[in-house]
Protein backbone atom coordinates (compact mmCIF):
# COMPACT_ATOMS: atom_id res chain seq x y z
CA UNK A 1 0.00 0.00 0.00
CA UNK A 2 1.39 3.35 -1.04
CA UNK A 3 0.74 4.92 2.28
CA UNK A 4 3.44 2.82 3.85
CA UNK A 5 6.09 3.62 1.33
CA UNK A 6 6.46 6.30 3.69
CA UNK A 7 5.70 4.48 7.03
CA UNK A 8 6.86 3.84 8.87
CA UNK A 9 7.84 7.07 9.31
CA UNK A 10 10.18 5.39 11.45
CA UNK A 11 10.74 2.55 9.00
CA UNK A 12 9.70 4.66 6.05
CA UNK A 13 12.32 7.14 7.10
CA UNK A 14 14.80 4.34 7.70
CA UNK A 15 14.28 3.21 4.10
CA UNK A 16 13.68 6.70 2.71
CA UNK A 17 14.32 7.17 -0.98
CA UNK A 18 16.33 10.31 -1.63
CA UNK A 19 16.42 12.27 -4.83
CA UNK A 20 18.22 15.24 -6.33
CA UNK A 21 16.98 18.72 -5.57
CA UNK A 22 14.79 20.09 -8.30
CA UNK A 23 14.09 23.78 -8.04
CA UNK A 24 13.09 24.74 -11.56
CA UNK A 25 14.13 27.64 -13.67
CA UNK A 26 11.93 27.27 -16.75
CA UNK A 27 8.30 26.88 -17.65
CA UNK A 28 8.36 23.09 -17.39
CA UNK A 29 9.26 23.12 -13.72
CA UNK A 30 6.93 25.90 -12.76
CA UNK A 31 9.83 27.66 -11.03
CA UNK A 32 10.08 31.11 -12.65
CA UNK A 33 7.35 31.37 -15.25
CA UNK A 34 5.06 34.36 -15.61
CA UNK A 35 1.88 34.40 -13.59
CA UNK A 36 -1.57 34.92 -14.98
CA UNK A 37 -2.96 38.28 -15.89
CA UNK A 38 -5.01 39.88 -13.19
CA UNK A 39 -2.69 38.81 -10.37
CA UNK A 40 -2.85 41.08 -7.38
CA UNK A 41 -1.75 41.36 -3.80
CA UNK A 42 -4.97 40.08 -2.34
CA UNK A 43 -8.33 41.44 -1.42
CA UNK A 44 -10.47 39.11 -3.53
CA UNK A 45 -14.04 38.65 -2.35
CA UNK A 46 -16.22 35.59 -2.55
CA UNK A 47 -19.80 35.87 -3.72
CA UNK A 48 -22.67 33.77 -2.42
CA UNK A 49 -22.40 31.38 -5.37
CA UNK A 50 -18.76 30.63 -4.51
CA UNK A 51 -17.29 32.58 -7.43
CA UNK A 52 -14.60 35.17 -6.79
CA UNK A 53 -14.65 38.77 -7.84
CA UNK A 54 -11.64 41.07 -7.71
CA UNK A 55 -7.93 40.34 -7.89
CA UNK A 56 -6.33 36.92 -8.16
CA UNK A 57 -3.54 36.49 -5.63
CA UNK A 58 -0.47 34.40 -6.49
CA UNK A 59 1.14 32.03 -3.99
CA UNK A 60 4.16 29.72 -4.23
CA UNK A 61 3.74 26.13 -3.05
CA UNK A 62 7.16 24.60 -2.29
CA UNK A 63 6.14 21.11 -3.29
CA UNK A 64 8.26 18.20 -2.05
CA UNK A 65 8.75 15.59 -4.74
CA UNK A 66 10.27 12.11 -4.76
CA UNK A 67 11.84 12.68 -8.18
CA UNK A 68 13.27 15.52 -10.21
CA UNK A 69 10.78 18.10 -11.39
CA UNK A 70 8.43 16.29 -13.78
CA UNK A 71 7.86 17.69 -17.25
CA UNK A 72 4.12 17.67 -16.85
CA UNK A 73 3.98 19.82 -13.76
CA UNK A 74 3.10 22.92 -15.79
CA UNK A 75 0.04 21.15 -17.18
CA UNK A 76 -0.99 20.09 -13.66
CA UNK A 77 -0.51 23.63 -12.38
CA UNK A 78 -2.64 25.04 -15.19
CA UNK A 79 -5.49 22.66 -14.42
CA UNK A 80 -5.33 23.47 -10.71
CA UNK A 81 -5.52 27.17 -11.43
CA UNK A 82 -8.60 26.72 -13.62
CA UNK A 83 -10.29 25.66 -10.39
CA UNK A 84 -8.70 27.91 -7.78
CA UNK A 85 -8.69 31.21 -9.65
CA UNK A 86 -12.44 31.20 -10.15
CA UNK A 87 -13.36 29.53 -6.86
CA UNK A 88 -11.08 31.19 -4.29
CA UNK A 89 -9.20 33.89 -6.21
CA UNK A 90 -5.83 32.18 -5.86
CA UNK A 91 -3.22 31.35 -8.48
CA UNK A 92 -0.72 28.76 -7.27
CA UNK A 93 2.80 28.32 -8.59
CA UNK A 94 4.05 24.79 -7.98
CA UNK A 95 7.73 24.87 -7.02
CA UNK A 96 8.94 21.23 -7.07
CA UNK A 97 11.93 20.50 -4.82
CA UNK A 98 13.45 17.06 -4.33
CA UNK A 99 13.26 15.41 -0.93
CA UNK A 100 17.01 15.16 -0.47
CA UNK A 101 17.65 18.91 -0.33
CA UNK A 102 14.19 20.19 0.48
CA UNK A 103 14.83 21.54 3.98
CA UNK A 104 18.04 23.27 2.97
CA UNK A 105 16.47 24.73 -0.17
CA UNK A 106 13.44 26.29 1.49
CA UNK A 107 15.67 27.71 4.20
CA UNK A 108 17.74 29.43 1.52
CA UNK A 109 14.59 30.69 -0.18
CA UNK A 110 13.31 32.18 3.05
CA UNK A 111 16.60 33.82 4.02
CA UNK A 112 17.13 35.04 0.44
CA UNK A 113 13.84 36.88 0.31
CA UNK A 114 12.28 34.67 -2.37
CA UNK A 115 8.54 34.25 -2.30
CA UNK A 116 7.58 31.03 -0.57
CA UNK A 117 4.15 30.58 0.94
CA UNK A 118 3.26 26.92 1.51
CA UNK A 119 5.93 24.57 2.85
CA UNK A 120 6.01 20.81 3.30
CA UNK A 121 7.39 19.03 6.36
CA UNK A 122 8.63 15.45 6.30
CA UNK A 123 9.62 14.83 9.90
CA UNK A 124 10.79 18.44 10.26
CA UNK A 125 7.86 20.13 12.00
CA UNK A 126 9.69 20.55 15.33
CA UNK A 127 12.80 21.80 13.56
CA UNK A 128 10.92 24.41 11.54
CA UNK A 129 8.91 25.51 14.57
CA UNK A 130 12.10 25.98 16.60
CA UNK A 131 13.57 28.11 13.79
CA UNK A 132 10.45 30.33 13.68
CA UNK A 133 9.87 29.36 10.06
CA UNK A 134 6.13 28.75 10.44
CA UNK A 135 3.25 31.21 10.61
CA UNK A 136 0.58 30.78 13.30
CA UNK A 137 -2.62 29.51 11.72
CA UNK A 138 -5.42 29.89 14.26
CA UNK A 139 -7.04 33.01 12.82
CA UNK A 140 -6.54 31.82 9.25
CA UNK A 141 -8.09 28.43 10.01
CA UNK A 142 -11.08 30.06 11.66
CA UNK A 143 -11.64 32.34 8.68
CA UNK A 144 -10.66 30.20 5.68
CA UNK A 145 -10.05 26.66 6.91
CA UNK A 146 -13.18 25.44 8.62
CA UNK A 147 -13.40 22.51 6.22
CA UNK A 148 -9.83 21.51 7.03
CA UNK A 149 -10.48 21.76 10.77
CA UNK A 150 -13.43 19.43 10.37
CA UNK A 151 -11.41 16.95 8.28
CA UNK A 152 -8.47 16.79 10.69
CA UNK A 153 -10.21 17.05 14.03
CA UNK A 154 -8.90 18.22 17.39
CA UNK A 155 -6.55 15.31 18.12
CA UNK A 156 -4.66 15.60 14.83
CA UNK A 157 -4.31 19.37 15.19
CA UNK A 158 -2.92 18.92 18.70
CA UNK A 159 0.18 17.38 17.11
CA UNK A 160 1.01 20.69 15.43
CA UNK A 161 -0.08 23.04 18.21
CA UNK A 162 2.31 25.00 20.40
CA UNK A 163 1.12 27.21 23.27
CA UNK A 164 -2.40 27.11 21.90
CA UNK A 165 -1.46 28.09 18.33
CA UNK A 166 -1.67 25.70 15.36
CA UNK A 167 1.43 25.99 13.16
CA UNK A 168 0.91 23.23 10.58
CA UNK A 169 -1.69 20.89 9.09
CA UNK A 170 -0.94 17.16 9.33
CA UNK A 171 -1.50 15.20 6.15
CA UNK A 172 -4.76 13.28 6.41
CA UNK A 173 -3.50 9.82 5.47
CA UNK A 174 -3.21 6.42 7.11
CA UNK A 175 -1.49 7.10 10.44
CA UNK A 176 -2.26 3.86 12.24
CA UNK A 177 0.82 1.92 11.13
CA UNK A 178 1.69 -1.08 13.28
CA UNK A 179 4.09 -4.01 13.36
CA UNK A 180 3.23 -6.71 10.81
CA UNK A 181 4.76 -10.09 10.13
CA UNK A 182 4.98 -10.72 6.39
CA UNK A 183 5.23 -14.41 5.49
CA UNK A 184 5.07 -16.46 2.30
CA UNK A 185 1.57 -17.78 1.66
CA UNK A 186 2.81 -21.12 0.31
CA UNK A 187 4.54 -21.84 3.62
CA UNK A 188 1.44 -20.89 5.59
CA UNK A 189 -0.55 -23.42 3.56
CA UNK A 190 2.10 -26.13 3.44
CA UNK A 191 2.85 -26.11 7.18
CA UNK A 192 -0.66 -25.39 8.39
CA UNK A 193 0.28 -22.18 10.17
CA UNK A 194 -2.85 -20.80 11.81
CA UNK A 195 -2.92 -17.03 11.35
CA UNK A 196 -5.60 -16.76 14.02
CA UNK A 197 -3.01 -17.76 16.61
CA UNK A 198 -1.60 -14.24 16.27
CA UNK A 199 -3.58 -11.57 18.12
CA UNK A 200 -3.87 -7.84 17.76
CA UNK A 201 -2.04 -7.18 21.01
CA UNK A 202 -3.37 -4.57 23.43
CA UNK A 203 -0.53 -4.93 25.95
CA UNK A 204 3.20 -5.47 25.73
CA UNK A 205 2.81 -8.94 27.23
CA UNK A 206 0.34 -9.90 24.49
CA UNK A 207 2.78 -8.59 21.91
CA UNK A 208 5.50 -10.91 23.17
CA UNK A 209 3.02 -13.80 23.25
CA UNK A 210 2.86 -13.27 19.49
CA UNK A 211 6.64 -13.71 19.42
CA UNK A 212 6.17 -17.08 21.14
CA UNK A 213 3.76 -18.11 18.38
CA UNK A 214 6.27 -17.00 15.75
CA UNK A 215 9.02 -18.96 17.45
CA UNK A 216 6.97 -22.12 16.90
CA UNK A 217 6.36 -21.18 13.27
CA UNK A 218 10.04 -20.50 12.64
CA UNK A 219 10.92 -23.91 14.06
CA UNK A 220 8.59 -25.59 11.56
CA UNK A 221 9.86 -23.50 8.64
CA UNK A 222 13.50 -24.08 9.52
CA UNK A 223 13.00 -27.83 9.73
CA UNK A 224 10.99 -28.08 6.50
CA UNK A 225 13.04 -25.59 4.47
CA UNK A 226 16.63 -25.30 5.69
CA UNK A 227 17.53 -23.68 2.38
CA UNK A 228 15.89 -20.43 3.48
CA UNK A 229 16.10 -18.30 6.62
CA UNK A 230 13.01 -17.29 8.54
CA UNK A 231 13.83 -13.60 8.96
CA UNK A 232 15.84 -10.87 7.26
CA UNK A 233 16.26 -7.21 8.29
CA UNK A 234 13.72 -4.65 7.21
CA UNK A 235 16.21 -1.83 6.81
CA UNK A 236 19.47 -0.46 8.22
CA UNK A 237 20.27 -3.90 9.60
CA UNK A 238 17.35 -3.98 12.00
CA UNK A 239 14.77 -6.71 12.45
CA UNK A 240 12.55 -3.87 13.86
CA UNK A 241 10.14 -5.94 15.97
CA UNK A 242 12.34 -5.15 18.99
CA UNK A 243 13.00 -1.52 17.98
CA UNK A 244 9.46 -0.39 17.16
CA UNK A 245 7.86 -1.75 20.32
CA UNK A 246 4.16 -1.16 20.96
CA UNK A 247 2.55 1.53 23.08
CA UNK A 248 5.67 3.66 23.30
CA UNK A 249 6.02 7.32 22.53
CA UNK A 250 9.59 7.61 21.20
CA UNK A 251 9.42 11.41 21.34
CA UNK A 252 11.36 12.07 18.14
CA UNK A 253 14.62 10.21 18.70
CA UNK A 254 14.45 7.21 21.09
CA UNK A 255 16.68 9.03 23.59
CA UNK A 256 14.06 9.23 26.31
CA UNK A 257 10.64 7.63 25.80
CA UNK A 258 7.29 7.15 27.45
CA UNK A 259 6.49 3.45 27.83
CA UNK A 260 2.99 2.09 28.34
CA UNK A 261 3.65 2.18 32.09
CA UNK A 262 5.65 5.41 32.42
CA UNK A 263 3.12 7.33 30.34
CA UNK A 264 0.84 7.14 33.39
CA UNK A 265 3.27 9.34 35.33
CA UNK A 266 4.75 11.15 32.30
CA UNK A 267 8.21 10.09 33.47
CA UNK A 268 10.66 9.81 30.59
CA UNK A 269 12.85 6.69 30.53
CA UNK A 270 15.84 5.50 28.58
CA UNK A 271 14.39 3.16 25.96
CA UNK A 272 17.48 0.96 25.79
CA UNK A 273 17.32 0.32 29.54
CA UNK A 274 13.72 -0.83 29.48
CA UNK A 275 12.66 -4.40 30.15
CA UNK A 276 10.74 -4.31 26.87
CA UNK A 277 13.86 -3.66 24.81
CA UNK A 278 15.73 -6.40 26.65
CA UNK A 279 12.94 -8.91 26.03
CA UNK A 280 12.94 -8.10 22.32
CA UNK A 281 16.69 -8.57 22.10
CA UNK A 282 16.42 -11.91 23.90
CA UNK A 283 14.01 -13.19 21.25
CA UNK A 284 16.30 -12.00 18.46
CA UNK A 285 19.35 -13.62 20.04
CA UNK A 286 17.51 -16.92 20.52
CA UNK A 287 16.31 -16.89 16.90
CA UNK A 288 19.78 -16.04 15.62
CA UNK A 289 21.38 -18.87 17.59
CA UNK A 290 18.85 -21.32 16.14
CA UNK A 291 19.59 -20.21 12.59
CA UNK A 292 16.24 -18.51 12.01
CA UNK A 293 17.79 -15.09 11.27
CA UNK A 294 20.09 -14.33 8.33
CA UNK A 295 23.64 -14.80 9.59
CA UNK A 296 24.91 -11.53 8.06
CA UNK A 297 21.79 -9.61 9.10
CA UNK A 298 23.82 -6.92 10.86
CA UNK A 299 25.80 -6.08 7.71
CA UNK A 300 23.66 -6.94 4.65
CA UNK A 301 22.69 -4.15 2.27
CA UNK A 302 19.97 -6.05 0.40
CA UNK A 303 16.31 -5.07 0.68
CA UNK A 304 13.97 -7.63 2.24
CA UNK A 305 11.91 -8.03 -0.92
CA UNK A 306 14.95 -9.26 -2.83
CA UNK A 307 15.29 -12.10 -0.33
CA UNK A 308 11.60 -12.94 -0.73
CA UNK A 309 11.80 -12.83 -4.51
CA UNK A 310 14.81 -15.15 -4.66
CA UNK A 311 13.37 -17.66 -2.20
CA UNK A 312 15.99 -16.99 0.46
CA UNK A 313 13.64 -15.92 3.28
CA UNK A 314 10.28 -16.97 4.60
CA UNK A 315 9.35 -13.75 6.35
CA UNK A 316 10.25 -10.32 7.63
CA UNK A 317 8.74 -7.71 9.94
CA UNK A 318 7.46 -4.41 8.62
CA UNK A 319 5.71 -1.44 10.16
CA UNK A 320 2.74 -0.72 7.95
CA UNK A 321 -0.94 -0.11 7.46
CA UNK A 322 -3.54 -1.77 5.24
CA UNK A 323 -2.50 -3.44 2.00
CA UNK A 324 0.97 -4.68 2.95
CA UNK A 325 0.47 -8.19 1.53
CA UNK A 326 -0.90 -6.83 -1.74
CA UNK A 327 1.95 -4.38 -2.17
CA UNK A 328 4.70 -6.90 -1.41
CA UNK A 329 3.11 -9.62 -3.54
CA UNK A 330 2.99 -7.20 -6.47
CA UNK A 331 6.59 -6.09 -5.92
CA UNK A 332 8.07 -9.59 -5.58
CA UNK A 333 5.79 -11.86 -7.59
CA UNK A 334 5.61 -14.08 -4.49
CA UNK A 335 2.26 -14.32 -2.72
CA UNK A 336 2.55 -13.31 0.92
CA UNK A 337 0.25 -12.66 3.84
CA UNK A 338 0.70 -9.84 6.35
CA UNK A 339 -0.67 -10.05 9.87
CA UNK A 340 -0.95 -7.10 12.22
CA UNK A 341 0.51 -7.86 15.63
CA UNK A 342 -0.64 -4.90 17.73
CA UNK A 343 -3.36 -2.26 17.92
CA UNK A 344 -2.42 1.22 16.67
CA UNK A 345 -1.00 3.86 18.98
CA UNK A 346 -0.58 7.39 17.69
CA UNK A 347 2.02 9.89 18.87
CA UNK A 348 2.83 13.47 17.99
CA UNK A 349 5.44 12.47 15.44
CA UNK A 350 3.35 9.71 13.87
CA UNK A 351 0.61 12.27 13.22
CA UNK A 352 2.66 15.30 12.17
CA UNK A 353 5.36 13.41 10.26
CA UNK A 354 4.00 14.80 7.00
CA UNK A 355 2.56 18.28 7.43
CA UNK A 356 1.96 21.52 5.57
CA UNK A 357 2.42 25.04 6.85
CA UNK A 358 2.64 28.64 5.77
CA UNK A 359 6.09 30.18 5.76
CA UNK A 360 6.68 32.84 8.38
CA UNK A 361 8.02 35.00 5.52
CA UNK A 362 4.81 34.71 3.48
CA UNK A 363 2.94 37.91 2.71
CA UNK A 364 -0.01 35.92 1.36
CA UNK A 365 -1.24 34.00 4.39
CA UNK A 366 -4.93 34.29 3.56
CA UNK A 367 -4.48 33.05 0.00
CA UNK A 368 -2.22 30.26 1.17
CA UNK A 369 -4.78 29.07 3.68
CA UNK A 370 -7.52 29.19 1.05
CA UNK A 371 -5.47 26.87 -1.14
CA UNK A 372 -4.57 24.57 1.75
CA UNK A 373 -8.25 24.27 2.56
CA UNK A 374 -8.87 23.12 -1.01
CA UNK A 375 -6.08 20.56 -0.65
CA UNK A 376 -7.92 19.02 2.30
CA UNK A 377 -11.49 19.27 0.99
CA UNK A 378 -11.47 19.31 -2.83
CA UNK A 379 -11.03 15.92 -4.51
CA UNK A 380 -10.24 17.49 -7.88
CA UNK A 381 -7.25 19.37 -6.43
CA UNK A 382 -6.05 16.30 -4.53
CA UNK A 383 -6.14 14.04 -7.58
CA UNK A 384 -4.38 16.58 -9.78
CA UNK A 385 -1.53 16.76 -7.28
CA UNK A 386 -1.49 13.00 -6.75
CA UNK A 387 -1.86 11.63 -10.29
CA UNK A 388 -1.76 14.53 -12.75
CA UNK A 389 -4.24 15.30 -15.52
CA UNK A 390 -6.92 12.77 -16.39
CA UNK A 391 -6.56 11.45 -19.91
CA UNK A 392 -2.90 12.44 -20.05
CA UNK A 393 -1.30 11.01 -16.93
CA UNK A 394 -4.02 8.61 -15.82
CA UNK A 395 -7.39 7.13 -16.78
CA UNK A 396 -10.21 5.91 -14.59
CA UNK A 397 -10.68 2.15 -14.92
CA UNK A 398 -13.99 0.24 -14.97
CA UNK A 399 -13.42 -0.93 -11.40
CA UNK A 400 -13.06 2.65 -10.12
CA UNK A 401 -9.28 2.62 -9.80
CA UNK A 402 -6.93 4.73 -11.89
CA UNK A 403 -3.99 3.62 -14.01
CA UNK A 404 -1.86 4.78 -16.92
CA UNK A 405 -3.57 5.51 -20.24
CA UNK A 406 -2.68 3.31 -23.20
CA UNK A 407 0.88 3.94 -24.28
CA UNK A 408 1.88 5.63 -21.02
CA UNK A 409 4.09 3.82 -18.52
CA UNK A 410 5.99 4.62 -15.35
CA UNK A 411 9.04 5.14 -17.55
CA UNK A 412 7.58 7.65 -20.01
CA UNK A 413 4.92 9.48 -18.00
CA UNK A 414 5.52 13.21 -17.68
CA UNK A 415 4.21 13.35 -14.10
CA UNK A 416 4.18 10.11 -12.10
CA UNK A 417 5.00 11.43 -8.62
CA UNK A 418 3.16 8.49 -7.03
CA UNK A 419 2.68 10.49 -3.82
CA UNK A 420 -0.97 10.06 -2.88
CA UNK A 421 0.21 9.69 0.72
CA UNK A 422 1.44 13.27 0.79
CA UNK A 423 -0.83 15.94 -0.64
CA UNK A 424 -3.28 17.06 1.99
CA UNK A 425 -6.10 14.53 2.18
CA UNK A 426 -5.31 11.08 0.83
CA UNK A 427 -8.83 9.92 1.52
CA UNK A 428 -10.07 12.10 -1.36
CA UNK A 429 -7.63 10.44 -3.74
CA UNK A 430 -8.47 7.82 -6.32
CA UNK A 431 -6.83 4.42 -5.78
CA UNK A 432 -3.99 3.70 -8.17
CA UNK A 433 -3.71 0.33 -9.87
CA UNK A 434 -6.30 -1.63 -11.82
CA UNK A 435 -7.73 -4.42 -9.70
CA UNK A 436 -6.83 -2.81 -6.38
CA UNK A 437 -9.29 -2.78 -3.50
CA UNK A 438 -10.95 0.63 -3.71
CA UNK A 439 -12.09 0.45 -0.08
CA UNK A 440 -8.49 0.81 1.11
CA UNK A 441 -8.79 4.48 2.07
CA UNK A 442 -12.03 3.88 3.94
CA UNK A 443 -10.23 1.29 6.05
CA UNK A 444 -7.26 3.57 6.63
CA UNK A 445 -9.55 6.35 7.80
CA UNK A 446 -11.43 3.98 10.11
CA UNK A 447 -8.13 2.84 11.64
CA UNK A 448 -7.18 6.44 12.35
CA UNK A 449 -10.43 7.04 14.16
CA UNK A 450 -10.14 3.92 16.32
CA UNK A 451 -6.48 4.41 17.31
CA UNK A 452 -5.34 5.27 20.82
CA UNK A 453 -3.32 8.47 21.31
CA UNK A 454 -0.27 8.96 23.50
CA UNK A 455 -1.00 11.20 26.50
CA UNK A 456 1.87 13.37 25.21
CA UNK A 457 0.15 13.97 21.86
CA UNK A 458 0.91 17.57 20.99
CA UNK A 459 4.29 17.73 22.70
CA UNK A 460 7.05 18.61 20.25
CA UNK A 461 10.57 18.27 21.55
CA UNK A 462 13.23 20.79 20.52
CA UNK A 463 16.67 19.16 20.56
CA UNK A 464 18.62 22.31 19.67
CA UNK A 465 20.37 22.65 23.03
CA UNK A 466 21.56 19.02 23.05
CA UNK A 467 22.44 18.65 19.40
CA UNK A 468 26.09 17.77 20.06
CA UNK A 469 25.07 15.04 22.51
CA UNK A 470 22.65 13.56 19.98
CA UNK A 471 25.40 13.40 17.37
CA UNK A 472 27.54 11.44 19.81
CA UNK A 473 24.59 9.20 20.73
CA UNK A 474 23.97 8.40 17.08
CA UNK A 475 27.51 7.14 16.75
CA UNK A 476 27.07 4.85 19.75
CA UNK A 477 23.75 3.57 18.48
CA UNK A 478 25.27 2.73 15.09
CA UNK A 479 27.89 0.65 16.88
CA UNK A 480 25.53 -1.47 19.00
CA UNK A 481 21.98 -1.41 17.69
CA UNK A 482 22.28 -3.48 14.48
CA UNK A 483 23.85 -6.35 16.41
CA UNK A 484 21.33 -6.25 19.25
CA UNK A 485 18.34 -5.91 16.94
CA UNK A 486 19.37 -8.81 14.69
CA UNK A 487 20.52 -11.08 17.52
CA UNK A 488 24.15 -11.14 16.45
CA UNK A 489 25.05 -9.46 19.75
CA UNK A 490 24.04 -11.10 23.02
CA UNK A 491 21.58 -9.20 25.26
CA UNK A 492 24.35 -8.98 27.86
CA UNK A 493 25.84 -6.26 25.62
CA UNK A 494 22.93 -3.97 26.47
CA UNK A 495 24.75 -2.89 29.65
CA UNK A 496 27.77 -1.81 27.61
CA UNK A 497 25.49 -0.10 25.10
CA UNK A 498 23.74 1.92 27.82
CA UNK A 499 27.03 2.80 29.51
CA UNK A 500 28.36 4.13 26.21
CA UNK A 501 25.17 6.12 25.65
CA UNK A 502 25.46 7.67 29.09
CA UNK A 503 29.08 8.61 28.43
CA UNK A 504 27.93 10.27 25.20
CA UNK A 505 25.43 12.49 27.03
CA UNK A 506 22.21 10.45 27.20
CA UNK A 507 21.22 11.81 30.61
CA UNK A 508 21.59 15.39 29.37
CA UNK A 509 19.11 14.65 26.60
CA UNK A 510 16.65 12.92 28.91
CA UNK A 511 16.80 15.79 31.41
CA UNK A 512 16.22 18.37 28.68
CA UNK A 513 13.34 16.38 27.24
CA UNK A 514 11.73 15.90 30.66
CA UNK A 515 12.01 19.61 31.43
CA UNK A 516 10.35 20.49 28.14
CA UNK A 517 7.62 17.91 28.73
CA UNK A 518 6.96 19.30 32.21
CA UNK A 519 6.71 22.82 30.83
CA UNK A 520 4.33 21.65 28.10
CA UNK A 521 2.12 19.92 30.65
CA UNK A 522 1.99 23.05 32.79
CA UNK A 523 1.14 25.24 29.79
CA UNK A 524 -1.70 22.92 28.82
CA UNK A 525 -2.96 22.17 32.34
CA UNK A 526 -2.21 18.48 31.94
CA UNK A 527 -1.76 16.36 35.04
CA UNK A 528 -0.04 12.98 34.92
CA UNK A 529 -2.44 10.07 35.00
CA UNK A 530 -5.44 12.14 33.90
Image: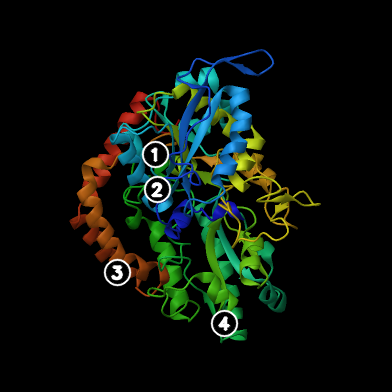
Q: Mark 1 or mark 4: which comes first in sequence?
A: 1
Q: Dot 1 surroundings within 10 Å: few (below 14), some, or many (20 or more)?
A: many
Q: What element carries label 1?
A: helix
Q: Is mark 3 on a helix, strand or loop?
A: helix
Residue drawn 59% across and 76% down?
A: 309
Residue nearer the viewer, 266 or 106? 106
Disc 4: which residue: 222
Front tag of 3 and 2: 2
- Determine which of the numbered discs, if any, sits on residue 493 in the image: 3
Q: Distance between the residues labelled 1 and 3?
A: 35 Å
Front tag of 1 and 4: 1
Q: Dot 3 surroundings within 10 Å: few (below 14), some, or many (20 or more)?
A: few
Q: Mark 1 or mark 3: which comes first in sequence?
A: 1
Disc 1: which residue: 125
Q: Mark 2 or mark 1: which comes first in sequence?
A: 1
Q: Mark 3 or mark 4: which comes first in sequence?
A: 4
Q: What element carries label 2?
A: loop
Disc 2: which residue: 250
Front tag of 1 and 3: 1
Q: Is residue 426 above or below residue 57?
A: below
Residue drawn 56% across and 15% down?
A: 54
Locate the N terminus by quadrant: bottom right
Q: Distance between the residues labelled 2 and 1?
A: 16 Å
Amino acid sequence: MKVKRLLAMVIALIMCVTSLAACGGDDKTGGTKDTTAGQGSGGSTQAADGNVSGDVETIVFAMMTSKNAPEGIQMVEDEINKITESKIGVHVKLEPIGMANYTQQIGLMMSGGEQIDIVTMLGTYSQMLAKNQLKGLNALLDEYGQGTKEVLGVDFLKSTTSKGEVYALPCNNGKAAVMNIVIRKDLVDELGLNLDDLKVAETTDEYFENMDVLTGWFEKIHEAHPEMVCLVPTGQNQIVFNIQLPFMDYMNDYYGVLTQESSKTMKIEDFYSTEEFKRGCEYAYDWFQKGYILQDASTTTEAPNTYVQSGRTAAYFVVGEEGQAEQITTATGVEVVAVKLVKPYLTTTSVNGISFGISSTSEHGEAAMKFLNEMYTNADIVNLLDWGVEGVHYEVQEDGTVDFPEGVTAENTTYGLNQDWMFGNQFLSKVWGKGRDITIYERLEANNKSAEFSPANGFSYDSTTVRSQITALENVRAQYLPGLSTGTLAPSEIDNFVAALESAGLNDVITEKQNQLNAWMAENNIEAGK
